[in-house]
Image: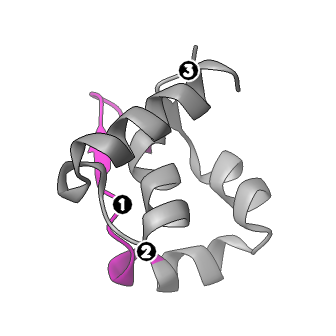
Amino acid sequence: MRHYYTYKDLMELLSCSKSTLEKKLPTMNIKKVYFGNSRPYFLIVDVHAYMLFNQSFKQCNQRQKAELRELLIYE
């Protein structure tokens, strides 16, 4: 199971260009993570929490977190 999305993955998932995605990211509750190189990665649980509940994974209650985990197991 993957844990992070790249810009390319997010562009395909949200059906938008990279410039549009870069404009939208500050308003989304999706955190960028860097691993030694200059490419940002995005936590899958944050992306799906934003798409389903319009909040970050940390802001979700226990029921919402369980629903997200269940959804991602079968993805």
Mark carried by residue 25? 2
- Given residues 8 and 55, the one toward you in this image is 55
- Residue at image position (22%, 51%) is 61
- Asked where in the image residue 2 lies, by quadrant, the reply is top right
- Magenta stretch contains residue 34: yes
Q: Secondary structure at mark 3?
A: loop
Q: Position of residue 72 (x, y in %)?
A: 57, 29
- Residue at image position (59%, 53%) is 7
Binning the other alpha carbons within 10 Å of mark 3 as few (below 14), some (14 to 19) or many (20 upward) gives: few
> Which amino acid does the dot numbered 3 rest on?
Arg
Q: Quadrant of the C terminus?
A: top right
Location of mark 1 (residue):
30
Q: Earlier in the sequence, mark 3 or mark 2?
A: 3
Label 3, label 1: how far apart the Cα atoms are: 16 Å
The answer to whether any part of residue 24 appears in the image is yes
17 lies left or right of 67: right
Q: Position of residue 46 (x, y in %)?
A: 39, 50
Q: Quadrant of the N terminus?
A: top right
Q: Earlier in the sequence, mark 3 or mark 1?
A: 3
- Asked where in the image residue 62 lies, by quadrant, the reply is top left
The answer to whether any part of residue 43 appears in the image is no
Q: Position of residue 55 (x, y in %)?
A: 33, 67
- Given residues 65 and 45, the one toward you in this image is 65
Mark carried by residue 2? 3
9 lies left or right of 72: right
> Which amino acid does the dot numbered 2 rest on?
Leu
